Image (cartoon, coloured by chain):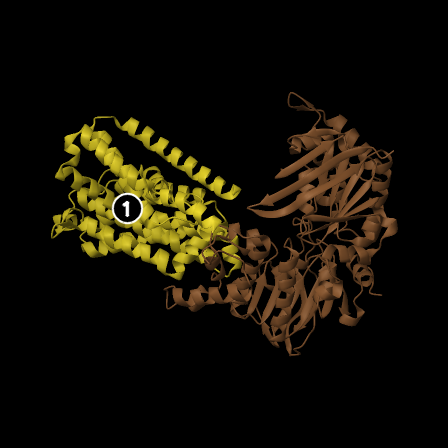
Chain colours: A brown, B yellow
Amino acid sequence: MSEELLKLEHISKAFSGVVVLEDISLSIPRGQVISIVGENGAGKSTLANIISGSLKPSSGKLYFEGKICEELSIRQAREYGISMVHQELMVLPELDITANIFIGTEYQKRGVLFQKKMREKAAAILKTLGMSISPDTLVKDIDISGRQMIEIARAISGRASIILLDEPTSSLSDTEIQKLFQVVQSLKQQGISFIFVSHRLKEVLEISDYIYVLKDGRLVTGLEPEKTDEDEIIVQMVGRSFDDFYDRKRTYFGKEALRLENFSGIEDKNLSRNAHIPRNVNLHVEEGEVLGISGLVGAGRTELARLIFGEDRKESGELYLFGEPVKLGCCREAYEKGLAWVTEDRKNEGLILDFDIKRNMVLPIQRRLARGAFVNKQAENAVVEKYIGRLNVKTTGSGQLTRYLSGGNQQKVVLAKWLASEPKVLVLDEPTKGIDVNAKHEIYTLINELTAQGMAIILISSELMEVIGMSDRIMVMHDGRISGEFEREEFTEEAIMACAVGKEKI
Amino acid sequence: MRGQIKFKSPNLLRKYSILIIIAGLIVFFSLMEHRFISAANITNIIRQSAVMIIVASGATFVMIAGDIDISIGGVACMTSVIAGLLIVKGFPIAVAVLVAVFFGGVCGIISGALIARFDFPSMVATLAMMNLTTGIANLLTDGTAISNLPASFQVMGRGYLGPVPIQVLAMLVIVVVASLVLTGTTYGRYIYAIGGNANVAKLSGINVKKMKLVYYMISGFCAAFGGILITSRMGSAQPTLGVSWPMDILSAIVIGGVSFKGGSGTILNAVFGIILMTLLTNGLTLLGINTFWQAVVTAILLMVTIIVNYLQDSRKKRD
């Protein structure tokens, strides 16, 4: 019965000489759910992108229904019925559902659209997905889980053989997840296969027919969900047990560093950034403490950081630094007050990729080091060399363009850039996103060192294990609000997830 | 190591290719037309380039920051008309020049403010500024030139200090100062950072809005100063001055090696670009090739430069 739809043979992929995937061979049978799990940076997304045709493998072969595909382009993949539902939703909020479903595959003849036909088809698809909503609804008027369903609707609107779901549950509540899984089960009966990319292991075990574990770009093992459990998967993913990897220990207990009272941003009804705006947030962090901020994608964690640093406009609320009320109109003022902010997207917010390591690192501090208006090159070089050494940045020299560094080393340069400003409060937004396991561990060690010297750290992360492993206290956000607070001894994945999806703290 | 060896060579080539082209042009035109290499013509080329280099130095700040200033011609025109009017009305020359340069700075600040505060695309803001300034110049003069400017004013454009024309000296001073500011000061670094990625610059604590005012102001100063030098040389303020500057000067800067995308380039790139373009027009004119052809040649040169830059960039990104 399990006829083979797609087969990968010895697939490898390298970017700028850095090997991201190595010798991957796996197969996707018809009508099954295959999960790919692994740490951030293990190569899950790269693999998904190769299967969906948006990246070409450096070597290896792909077979679809037994026939070799020489060049799998996005167009070719679409003809085969392979489509991808992205984690960052790719919808056009100003258009209606019908238009979003058929974008690029419109029913048309010589440029004339068959509106009615598309609308009927859209209504039918929505019905199979169990959505009671008019196809004329503008996408900006539906919530995030609905937007995701629209992407699935788009995938099944044409020929569908394989649907890749990239972290599909990261912004969904429990009931929404159950609904999604029902849809997956019923589409499976129709012979559609799913590739489920996730690090929510409980869900992976629930929905999968087979589980592949990726680590550092290699396929370490394949597991059958009935014969394994979460612990085994974690050991396979990380290569060591949880406690060895996240060895958080708080050693410095100081006074309160930063406090927010009733922090609210200005409401954004259209969710134009696919995220909620923080409302009535109260929190504090002490010197030497790591405060983890957890929550689903879109819960408003990054937006909270933007609000703290004055980059988004505040509706109300007070910010206290070491007990003093402070007004921060923009991030520059925050930096002057001893805050620093490692932003989420290192390629668009953290680094100027065409600048070398040195010029990136000194960006926030060159004024402080300068003699009058003139750049102080000696002082800059000293700082740069110090932090390249301290963070163990692997590079040919401080003159290397950051574009050519691996993700982990890029992230270290961003960290160095902010550590060089010697902050008292450090906000880390997804500091280990897309970097390899070793660099990740180095960053965790660094967090321990910095807090041991009295730095206060706010750690924003969508990786639950990371937040649990590295925080002293966790605040959970849901739909822009704080839905729970946990002390270290209360940390459990279940309790935090429950808060993240909006339930009361147990 | 791999990266270094691989990228050093195209960079070197890119840095010096313009000098090779300049040398080639000089040899070519000298062989074709003996008047080209005469002392009179060489002085002429140097003097013509001097003013353009001054204006280009300011515009280069804007280009490195990833913006564009097409109002340079209009600003030069309006400010030199203002200087001319003040001189004719009997104001001291120094006052007239200072007022003109001041207005150049004001125009720059206004363009910068439209872009920084009201989010105008830089093309649109400076296009508006260009029309505004040429309009005002024509209103002030009724569309005719202000001639008979006194000989004492013409010294700037025609005089010599020893063997060196004053405008060439002025150019050298501006080139040196501009280079120093760009490479040696934090302001210069900020301009490169903004051109590299304005979002990163902002999140690194750089006051991007303020810097926009600063570099547009610098461009305005330089445009006004260049305009006054030309007016001084001609002895009359023309409301048609600088009409072709946006295209001529901006393409010379790009051909010289400053990227349209911002983040890279130096004042020296702009200097070589201007010299190349001046040589080219001068040589073609001496050969008797009509000016329409000159426009075609420079436009093609611009396109080729940008295509070459694109190809080098995409190679860089692929590796």
Q: Residue at x 85, y 33 (%)?
A: A190
Q: Nearer the viewer, residue B220 or B22?
A: B22
Few, some or many C-alpha atoms within 10 Å of disc 1 (few <14, some 14-19, many ≥20)? many
- Is disc 1 placed on a helix, strand or loop? helix
Where B54 falls versus A153 (above or below)?
A: below
Specify the quadrant of the image occupied by residue A472: bottom right
Residue B132, x across and y down, in percent? 37, 43
Question: Which quarter shows the N terminus of chain A?
Answer: top right
From the image, tell me which residue sits under label 1. B53
Question: Which quarter shows the C terminus of chain A?
Answer: bottom right
Q: Residue at x 67, y 55 (%)?
A: A267
Give the left or right position of residue B117, taking residue B81 as reference.
Answer: right
Residue B164, x across and y down, in percent? 15, 50
Residue A124, x across and y down, in percent? 82, 32
Residue A495, x across and y down, in percent? 82, 63
Q: Nearer the viewer, residue A320 or A43?
A: A43
Where A371 falls versus B135 (above or below)?
A: below
Residue kind at label 1, given as amino acid type: Ile
Give the left or right position of residue A167, taking residue A19 as reference.
Answer: right
